[in-house]
Image (spheres, rainbow, N blue to C red):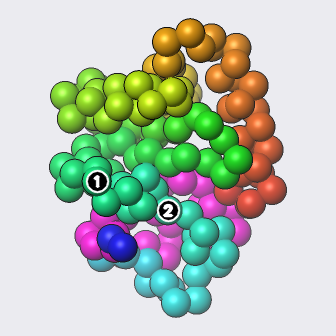
Amino acid sequence: MRTCGECTRCCYTMSVPEYNSPANSYCNNCVVGKGCSIHEERKEVCKNFSCLWLTQEQIPESLRPDKCHVLFELPPNSMTYVGYVDQDFPDSYNEPNVRNLIQKITEAGHPVVLYQGDDKQKLYALPEGMTKEQVQEDDKNAYVQLKKAGRVE
């Protein structure tokens, strides 16, 4: 299994209410470029999170979140992949390697929702025959699961 290495994008991108850490702001426990300063004692919400790059070894190194500037995940009990676009690199989702990953996900029958910018504008990539409304319903269900897991307020 892969390790995060120098990548700390989840420590920046994700909201962690247990640490009063809002999204798009480094967690107080993050040592940028090194990782979590309380890694062994971190809370379950952090222990239970793994980005797509970390869990899918077939995804190339170039798509590690700190390199491609998009953090992908598949929330629990969801069929919709979620990508969080680094606000400092707002067009990173259009880079060829990122577009290729999105295309492979949609060709496998899964939608992708990209959250972009401070206002979290949603961009949709849909498999053929799927509607935005179907994805929005799945997105709502994923949000409920993330809230139960303590990942969102």
Give the label on residue 50, or none.
2
Task: Estimate the x, y position of residue 137 in percent, counting from the top left.
Answer: 75, 25
The residue depicted at 66 percent of the width and 51 percent of the height is 76
Q: Is residue 23 magenta?
A: yes
Mark 2: which amino acid?
Answer: Ser
SS class, disc 2: loop
Residue 34 badge = none
| 144 horizontally vs 21: left or right | right
Farthest residue to the bottom: give it. 40
- The quarter of the picture where residue 48 lies is bottom right
Mark toward the start of the polypeptide (2 vs 1): 2
- Residue at position x 54%, y 53% in the image: 14
Q: Nearer the viewer, residue 17 or 100?
A: 100
Q: Is residue 106 magenta?
A: no
Residue at 36%, 42% (x, y): give it: 70
Q: Which mark is residue 58?
A: 1
Q: Is residue 152 visible in the rendered structure shown here?
A: no
Residue 72 in view of the camera = yes
**Residue 122 image offset from top left, x and y in percent:** 54, 23
Magenta segment's dominant SS is loop
Q: Work out whether 41 lies above or below 45.
A: below
- 38 vs 103, left or right, is right
